Image (spheres, helix red, strand yellow):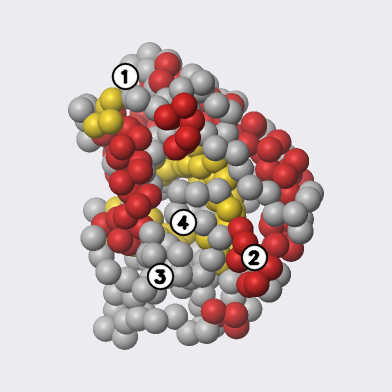
């Protein structure tokens, strides 16, 4: 942070810490770049993913129709972090996961998750509950369900690339994603005209690392957008390509690699004063693994639950 309490802007980096990986390219020629990027930043850009831009646009349009409704209409869908429904203003402070006390994050979210039951009652009751769909925007459900099916397949496709980049076989990670959990947040970052001036130390999303294996992010560019942190360059604006998805690894993946790869630390800047009408929306797919997976002595889903609880403000 600067002395004014505003976030420091990005410093320039001397090299491409976050490379672009074409999934239609030869994976053998990409392994060194993937390994370096995940050691230094924990982030990649991925093209050749095959996700229909029209589907992503449709989700944003339907979700925005919900987010701009009066709070009283949205309130029946309110849930705590980790639930399926609406996370309203002030529900999360992601920097809490790092032990940092910050004001709540300046965002709203619609949150969905895996719901196909495993047949194990205790597991299903915690991790595979039915999703809640806002009746006010019925077109959202088929769009999100189509997107989730595509993202599940894409996440496994990416994991099959990561195994060999680590020096393992292609199924090193996906043999543990036969019936995985996942979360999906549609994050709406309202304009400063709506949120008012941020408090000192307040972000759209505070500094943190994700908790699972890989996160697949479809984001929009903006002045108050995503930044990543590296040891060499500190905070810097994340590179953006409208054709690419941003992929970062989370804590479980970092543990899985014995610490060789780093969980990508990131934040989303507050709504900018010089662009008070800027609003952004991100589609964030958090991929995990099968419940009961133990990674270097860590029970995966006990860890996930502890991290979700940690960022809840209520």
Determine contact: label 3, label 2, CB under 8 Å.
no
Residue 75 visible in this rendered orientation of the protein: yes
Q: Which residue is mark 1?
A: 167
The tag earlier along the polypeptide, 2 or 4, is 2
Determine which of the numbered discs, if any, sits on residue 104 in the image: 3
**Eyeballing the image, is 207 above or below 34?**
below
The image shows residue 224 at horizontal and vertical percentages of: 50, 69
The tag earlier along the polypeptide, 1 or 2, is 2
Q: Nearer the viewer, residue 129 or 24?
A: 129
Which marked residue is nearer to the observer: mark 1 or mark 4? Answer: 4
Q: Quadrant of the N terminus?
A: bottom left
Residue 13 visible in this rendered orientation of the protein: no
Lateral position of residue 46 relative to residue 33, left or right = right
Residue at horizontal 40%, vertical 70%?
A: 104
Q: Which residue is mark 2?
A: 74
| Classed neighbour count for the residue bearing mark 1: other residues with Cα under 10 Å, few (<14), some (14–19), many (≥20) | few
């Amino acid at each position: 942070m600067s002395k004014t309490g505003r976030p420091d802007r990005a410093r320039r980096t001397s090299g491409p810490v976050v490379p672009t990986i074409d999934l239609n390219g030869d994976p053998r020629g990409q392994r060194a770049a993937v390994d370096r990027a995940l050691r230094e930043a924990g982030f990649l850009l991925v093209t050749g993913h095959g996700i229909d831009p029209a589907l992503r646009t449709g989700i944003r349009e339907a979700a925005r129709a919900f987010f701009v409704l009066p709070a009283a209409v949205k309130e029946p869908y309110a849930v705590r972090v980790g639930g399926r429904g609406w996370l309203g203003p002030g529900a999360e402070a992601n920097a809490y996961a790092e032990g940092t006390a910050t004001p709540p994050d300046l965002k709203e979210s619609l949150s969905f998750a895996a719901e196909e039951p495993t047949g194990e009652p205790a597991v299903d009751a915690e991790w595979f509950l039915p999703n809640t769909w806002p009746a006010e925007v019925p077109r959202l459900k088929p769009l999100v369900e189509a997107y989730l099916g595509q993202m599940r397949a894409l996440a496994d496709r990416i994991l099959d690339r990561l195994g060999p980049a680590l020096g393992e076989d292609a199924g090193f990670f996906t043999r543990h994603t036969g019936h995985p959990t996942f979360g999906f947040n549609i994050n709406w970052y309202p304009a400063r005209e709506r949120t008012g001036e941020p408090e000192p130390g307040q972000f759209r999303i505070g500094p943190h690392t994700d908790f699972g294996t890989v996160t697949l992010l479809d984001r929009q560019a903006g002045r108050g957008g995503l930044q990543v942190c590296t040891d060499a360059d500190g905070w810097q604006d994340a590179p953006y390509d409208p054709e690419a998805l941003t992929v970062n690894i989370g804590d479980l993946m970092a543990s899985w690699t014995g610490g060789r790869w780093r969980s990508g630390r990131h934040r989303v800047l507050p709504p900018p004063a010089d662009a008070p009408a800027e609003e952004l929306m991100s589609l964030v797919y958090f991929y995990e693994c099968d419940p009961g997976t133990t990674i270097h002595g860590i029970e995966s889903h006990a860890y996930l639950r502890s991290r979700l609880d940690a960022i809840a403000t209520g």
